[in-house]
Amino acid sequence: MINIAILGLGFMGKKYLTAIEGIDEAQVSAIIDDSATENIENIPYFKSLDDFLCSEIKMDLVVISTPNYLHFSQAKTLLEHGYHILIEKPFCLKGSDMEVLIKIAQEKQLKIFFSTPNRFSPALAWLKKIQSENILGQSYLVQVNCFWNRDQRYYTPQSWKGKKELDGGTLYTQFFHFLDLILFTFGKAELLSSYMDTFRHQSLVEIEDTGVLTLKLATGGLVNFNFTTAVWDKNMETSMNIIAENGSVKISGQYFDEVSICNLKNYKFSLDEITDNEYSNLQLNLKYALKKLYDTECDLEEMLYHQNLISLVEDIYRNSK
């Protein structure tokens, strides 16, 4: 049985708790949270990370699901104390911080895993497959639209959310996974232009609520990424449109879990190709990490990929107009 500690029992921490309960090979063996209730489902709890470390409790993996600004310092501390970790997005707010974590992990032969559950969506797994098999041919234009609602129900006065130094911005908190999916599916990209503004949330936040990005894929195609949290009342759209050499594809749904359009040369799409999994995307992400926990060496390529992703987000903010 693989023993997992959850650091931070907020919205995402509770999702991890539920997800791990549905995985046979793992169990939550500790919760670390300053507001944790004693004996949550008979799981040992600790009021602070220091208390957990002082206990010298044995743990196979620690999941970090605290507010954004804490991820780097807590990840660094856990690695220095010899723990394998899985970090909720954003993994860090700076590429240089990710570089520090990678160095420690290599020195101590520890593993850093990353929360990328949308990669395990059946629709995205299918898209990755046909892209890898060159069924699409060259991708000319990839357009991603994330038109979401976040308002005073989300940005509460005492929250870290929406604070520039603590949150980082919507590309870290809301839309990080979608940048990951672009690069994961279509390969490396460089920034051509970045435009951001704050329209609806000027009195609520210190960050942008709307942006338009243009990226250039290393393979030559273009990416147009439109995102906003300024939609009134509720989310409006999450979609990816792909115009490629051999046809067109549209992925939609809140977590890119639907194939809305598939019109490809010499290819007949079947819904059987995106049959729902037995496990949730988050559980599949966890099972992927657990399988690699003791079976393989440190995945330097994956860690460097995520360092480059964070550096791209930094570049987007640095060059935004």
Image (cartoon, rainbow, N blue to C red):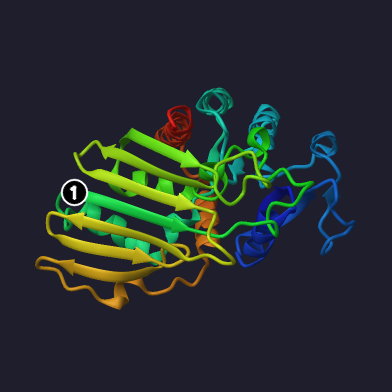
Left or right for 264, reference 31? left
Q: Position of residue 105 (x, y in %)?
A: 56, 29
Determine the secondary structure under disc 1.
Answer: strand
Q: Quadrant of residue 79?
A: top right
| Residue 280 can be seen, yes or no | yes
Q: In the displayed structure, would residue 122 be above or below residue 199? A: below
Furthest residue in direction bottom, as rendered: 271
Furthest residue in direction right, as rendered: 38
User: Which residue is at the front of the view, 39 or 110?
Assistant: 39
Q: Position of residue 258 (x, y in %)?
A: 37, 70
Furthest residue in direction left, as rendered: 266
Q: Position of residue 127 (x, y in %)?
A: 30, 59
Left or right for 265, reference 172? left
User: Which residue is at the front of the view, 202 or 309?
Assistant: 202
Label tally: 1
Q: In the displayed structure, would residue 8 be above or below residue 24? A: above
Q: In the displayed structure, would residue 100 be above or below residue 265? A: above
Q: Amino acid at mark 1?
A: Tyr
| Residue 71 can be seen, yes or no | no
Left or right for 246, reference 157? left
Position of the N terminus, as image quadrant, is bottom right
Q: In the displayed structure, would residue 116 be above or below residue 54? A: below
Classify mark 1: residues with Cα within 10 Å, few (<14), some (14-19) or many (20+).
some
Q: Residue at x 14, y 69 (%)?
A: 267
Position of the C terminus, as image quadrant, is top left
User: Which residue is at the front of the view, 126 or 95?
Assistant: 95
Q: Residue at x 18, y 69 (%)?
A: 263
Q: Residue at x 49, y 49 (%)?
A: 175
Q: Which residue is mark 1?
A: 140
Q: Residue at x 68, y 50 (%)?
A: 4
